[in-house]
């Protein structure tokens, strides 16, 4: 170690600006996972995987018993897969 050695300081500057300001300064091409993965799977003649659009799920868990006195209407978003419903009862001994 040479304690007398001088190193130049490094400074970094960041600017925070609204999206419309940033987009007025440069051109950006947006990519969205739902569209990209669906198109890529079809192009490769592969099954379309579950997409971020398909991420909805509802979970009911109980310790010893569960009596749901209601209904669940699970509808997919436009062009998405149906949400999943999981119900589990864990018996304690």
Image: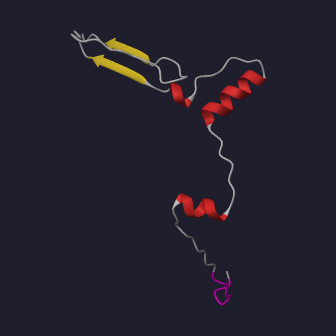
Residue at the far bottom: name it: 4
Q: Is residue 3 magenta?
A: yes
Quarter of the figure with residue 9: bottom right
Q: Which residues are magenta?
A: 2-9
Whether residue 57 is situated above or below residue 12 in the rendered picture: above
- State the image coordinates of residue 24 (x, y, percent, origin top left): 62, 62
* Residue appearing at x 67%, y 88% in the figure: 6
Q: Nearer the viewer, residue 32 or 69?
A: 32
Q: Is residue 26 magenta?
A: no
Seen in the image, is 14 located left or right of residue 73?
A: right
* Residue appearing at x 77%, y 18% in the figure: 45
* Residue appearing at x 65%, y 46% in the figure: 30
* Residue appearing at x 35%, y 13% in the figure: 87
Whether residue 10 is situated above or below residue 22 in the rendered picture: below
Seen in the image, is 84 located left or right of residue 51?
A: left
- State the image coordinates of residue 38 (x, y, percent, origin top left): 66, 26
Asked if residue 15 can be seen in this view, the reply is: yes
- State the image coordinates of residue 93 (x, y, percent, origin top left): 24, 10
């Amino acid at each position: 170690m040479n304690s007398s050695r001088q190193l130049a300081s490094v400074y970094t500057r960041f600017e925070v600006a609204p999206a419309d300001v940033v987009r007025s300064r440069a051109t950006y091409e947006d990519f969205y996972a739902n569209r990209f993965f669906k198109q890529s799977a079809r192009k490769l003649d592969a099954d379309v995987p579950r997409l971020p659009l398909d991420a909805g799920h509802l979970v009911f868990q109980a310790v010893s018993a569960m009596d749901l006195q209601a209904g669940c209407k699970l509808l997919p978003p436009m062009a998405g897969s149906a949400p999943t419903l999981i119900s589990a009862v864990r018996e304690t001994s």
